[in-house]
Amino acid sequence: MKRLFILSNRLPVTIWHEKDQIKVSNSSGGLVSAISSYINHSGNTGTEKFSEKFWVGIPGCSEKVWESATVQLTDDAFGYLPVFVPPKAYDQYYNGLSNSVLWPLFHYFPSYAEYNAQYFDNYIAANEAFVAALLSKLNDDDILWIHDYHLLPLAGKIRAHFPKITIGFFLHIPFPSFEIFRLMPSRWQEEFLKGMLGADLIGFHTIDYASHFLETIQMVLNIENEHHIVKYQNRLIKIDVFPISIDYEKYNSAYKLPEVASKRKTYREQFNQQKIIFSVDRLDYTKGVFCRLKAYERFLVKYPEFKEKVVFVMVIVPSRDTIKKYAERKTEIDGFIGDFNSRIGNITWKPVNYQYTHLDFHDLMALYTACDLALITPLRDGMNLVAKEFISSRQDLQGVLVLSEMAGAARELTDALTINPNDIEGTADSIRAGLRMPAEQQSKKLVNMQKRVRQYDIIAWGEDFMNELSLIKIKQKEFEFKFLNPEAIEALIGKYKSRKNRLLLLDYDGTLVPFSAVPEQAAPDRNLLKLLHHLSEDPGNDIFIVSGRDSGSLDRWLGHLNINIIAEHGAKFKRKGSGWKTSIVYMSDENWKQNILQVMQKYELRCANTFIEKKDYSVAWHFRNAEPEQAKVRSAELFTELNDYSKDLNIQVFKGNKVIEVRIKGMDKGYAVKQILKEKAYDFILACGDDYTDEDMFRVLTKYDEAFTIKIGYEASYAQFNLYTPQMTVSLLEMLSRIPVAGNELRLKEKNA
Ligand code: GDG
């Protein structure tokens, strides 16, 4: 059993002074109840149980106060590990970088962001305080789950000390598009992204946020993904979607609680025959309060028959009011509502019933279940749990949800009346439609939405995340860097000796010969030619050079040997003793190459010392010799542009070792190897390659017990082993060529004589 550490900005505790005493109690914010629900139920559903559980966060008091106060904590579900950050630094980390840069930017309010260098320095310092507090407590077997935008760099910083530790990171707010993210100084961008990539699993609420993240790491760090998995610092990292949810049963069963039922009755009586519209959110400019009020006003003006027949109960919960933007907002809302009520209302009817307060759970449930319509209109919202809570609370299957399409929840709650919060007219119409919706239609919609929240509730969310986290750790093991050590060489030689049908699959550039500045200059030397000839003379060996190169160069250099050659990643092949053939049967659009060439030529001009390689079935732009910084930017741009162009065509864009290549879809070395294996059964397979294109071949061969797969280079790979350089591949092949194999001893003796 492993230990679980939850890391979040604040520890879930409340500290207060009572007379001369310091009191501390466990507090249950949204995150703590979410995690607790998952932990408490996980035993029933097979998720790994944890030997110990700790919560790591800032307690909001000094070390001295904490020491005198901790004794009063009673809940033993979690051990608390406090992180102390001095008040001034905390202010710049929390109110500064977290809530005056990341929060506005990630919610698409770039003009609210304050790029203050001190904020950044203190944000990093606060994250380092977490590391310092944990260093002596962690070990590589622990599981860490880091939460939210306050701790973006933390996973990377912990990873530096514990390379094998398991870390999950979940972002509770949106991840913005690259064009927004790039507004931050580039040093900040890199620090945040590299930090996040210290995790093994990075979770977002929606597919859009995950895609934005993937695009951003591509543009900033030049990191690509394959099916949402990226390779970074020799580690596989999964980027996935986990829409946070709620404890469905808790909200659903609250309907019948006596306190809730009686408060519901009070509210209904208070508003008599009026329809109740309800909203509740933290004081935050992202929540779209003004749009909401304007839409409500438009509704009353456009549909005056609702005047005096409806009331809008709007609860705003105090939040971050020490930040200027939030304090200003409060004053504006107060003024706006006062004016609204006097303009639209009358002596007996106040159209907006506004409270700036925190409701207790029973009050909140009473309002969720008393209202006729929940009006949720954020301008941006990572998820929005209020929407899910409202849906779940309606055991009576009555009530309408009007929901902004800018909330993550809109992706799942598709039966809501979705609105664009900036569309005042449209929102006003949706309010009317909601208030006039027939009872059966309300029920039908609620049944569908309740089903979704019930099925993927907070427990499912936690389990889903933890399961994915353990799966990626398993995948990482398959992918680790493993040097081909003497024992492995011995095993390889042993098999080579005893088997009669041997297949040698050898990539060319970077595997048999080192990379050279210009592709045409990578000709094989005499030694390599002699070696290949030697190996090919053994009747038990079938040698395939499996290359992405053009057939012309390969033919010139190797065509005279008695070996098979695969060019252009499988698009062309030459069997020993015969001529070149192609495996491309049909090409939908012959113009693609010309168009791709035109795009690449633009980049050849814009980025000095790059060049284009034209092949029969592919085109490649090489940037090996270009200035690295410029090449990084241009290659990222070209990659995006080519991907856009190729979307609907039968071609695919690949990024290799300092090259971007466009080729026919499905044509890869994995496909080529599958074809070879279809034709003949082999009892020994050796595959060597250095590039990402060779990974396709390695992946196919993971299913063959008799295969030895070797990645040339220092990177982790799907291959079983690594060798560092092409010289080492050649030495290994020389070793094999000297082995007297069954039946061949005589012939070899003669040759060596
Ligand atoms: C962030 C993301 C994401 C609110 N007022 C009262 C009260 N609440 C509770 C609600 C709900 C929670 O607070 C608010 O959660 P939201 O999801 O709506 O919004 P954020 O606080 O901005 O949360 C958000 C979330 O993280 C989770 O990942 O969904 O997008 O911004 O649970 O019930 N609870 C009580 N009284 C109140 O007056 N008792």
Image (cartoon, helix red, strand yellow):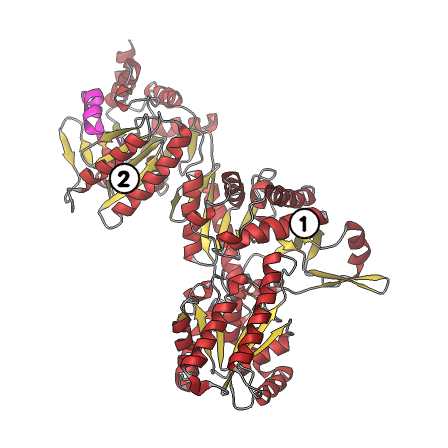
The span from disc 1 to disc 2 (Cα, nearest Å) is: 52 Å
What's under tag 1, amino acid-wise?
Tyr
Q: Quadrant of ligand 1?
A: bottom right
Circle 2 sits in a helix, a strand or a loop, which is it? loop
Query: Closer to the N terminus: mark 1 or mark 2?
Result: 1
Percent from the top left, x then y, of residue 72? 79, 62
Q: Residue reaching furthest top? A: 753
Circle 1 sits in a helix, a strand or a loop, which is it? helix
Q: Which mark is residue 90?
A: 1
User: What span is in magenta?
Assistant: 548-566
Residue underneath mark 2: 668
The reply to whether residue 269 is in sight is yes
Q: Residues within 10 Å of mark 2 (few under 14, many from 20)?
A: many
Picture quarter containing residue 685?
A: top left
Q: Examine the rendered structure and indicate whether residue 366 appears above or below residue 179.
A: below
Residue that appears at 46% across and 29% down:
483
Drawn side of residue 615 relative to residue 401, left or right: left
Percent from the top left, x then y, of residue 691? 36, 33
Q: Which mark is residue 680?
A: none
Q: Examine the rendered structure and indicate whether residue 239 appears above or below residue 352.
A: above
